[in-house]
């Protein structure tokens, strides 16, 4: 197709994806009180400090979950846009890539919420001891949760990304072994980014599974290398 037809097709796929997000956001919104009731189990009570904050938090939460629920449909739109340009072999690999990426991302989200978030919250609150009483704002807690959970979801895509880069020949598998020092620095930097606090303990806790994922990524790079 000519360039303008490609752009028109891209515009159509983007609009459809946005519609999915809007629809699912609207569907989720009435359930946000129950969802907040579930999310606050990690910290007990949550507070809001301005009249409009409670509304903004519900909208933010419903939008976040709307995007999360829309991901399979958005990925399908990406597939429909890309697939006409792929060969049969590339279609096979890209289909497996999308499906694997979907499950890996949600596995990371589940791991981040069910395993690392409780440990991080408990560790951080313990520094208050018997002297300081935590008064946790709902906006701050929701942002904290999103950073941790989304960051873990993205980090679980690392093995898949290294497999793809090695498969198409951009990076040689042996490079990951030779540049392990840079890998460690990158992991620590990424851990610092996805942890919205400045304490070293949270960063180190988050970096542990990333080190494991880096080792797995080296293995998948050799599996995908040619």
Image (cartoon, rainbow, N blue to C red):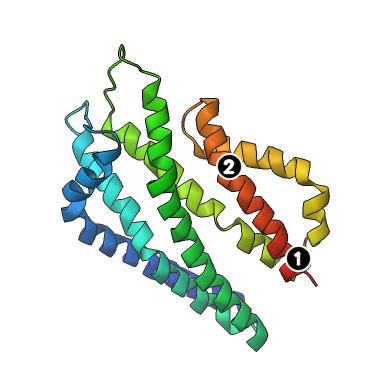
Residue for badge 1: 222
Q: Which residue is located at x 50 percent, y 32 percent?
A: 202
Residue 66 % position (x, y): 31, 58
Q: Is residue 1 in view from this perspective?
A: no
Q: Is residue 187 left or right of residue 135?
A: right
Number of the label disc, if any, that sits on residue 208 = 2
Residue 207 % position (x, y): 58, 40
* Nearer to us in this view, 133 or 102: 133
Q: Earlier in the sequence, mark 1 or mark 2?
A: 2
* Nearer to us in this view, 139 or 39: 39
Q: In this view, does 70 lie to the left or right of 154?
A: left
Dot 1: element? helix
Marks 2 and 1: in contact by CB < 8 Å? no
Residue 221 % position (x, y): 72, 63
Name the image quarter holding residue 31. bottom left
Dot 2: element? helix
Q: Is residue 218 in view from this perspective?
A: yes
């Amino acid at each position: 197709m000519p360039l303008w037809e490609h752009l028109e097709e891209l515009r159509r796929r983007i609009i459809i994806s946005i519609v999915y997000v809007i629809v699912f956001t609207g569907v989720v919104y009435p359930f946000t009180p129950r969802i907040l009731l579930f999310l606050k189990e990690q910290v007990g009570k949550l507070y809001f400090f301005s009249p409009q904050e409670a509304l903004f938090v519900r909208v933010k939460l419903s939008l976040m979950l709307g995007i999360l629920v829309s991901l399979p449909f958005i990925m399908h739109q990406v597939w429909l846009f890309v697939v006409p340009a792929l060969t049969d072999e590339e279609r096979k690999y890209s289909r497996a890539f999308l499906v694997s990426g979907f499950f890996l991302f949600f596995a990371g989200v589940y791991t981040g919420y069910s395993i690392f978030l409780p440990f991080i919250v408990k560790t951080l609150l313990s520094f208050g001891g018997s002297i300081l009483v935590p008064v946790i704002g709902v906006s701050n807690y929701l942002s904290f949760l999103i950073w941790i959970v989304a960051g873990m979801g993205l980090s679980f895509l690392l093995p898949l990304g290294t497999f793809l880069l090695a498969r198409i020949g951009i990076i040689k598998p042996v490079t990951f072994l030779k540049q392990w020092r840079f890998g460690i620095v990158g992991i620590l930097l990424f851990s610092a980014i996805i942890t919205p606090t400045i304490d070293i303990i949270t960063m180190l806790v988050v970096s542990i599974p990333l080190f494991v994922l880096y080792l797995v990524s080296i293995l998948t790079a050799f599996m995908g290398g040619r």
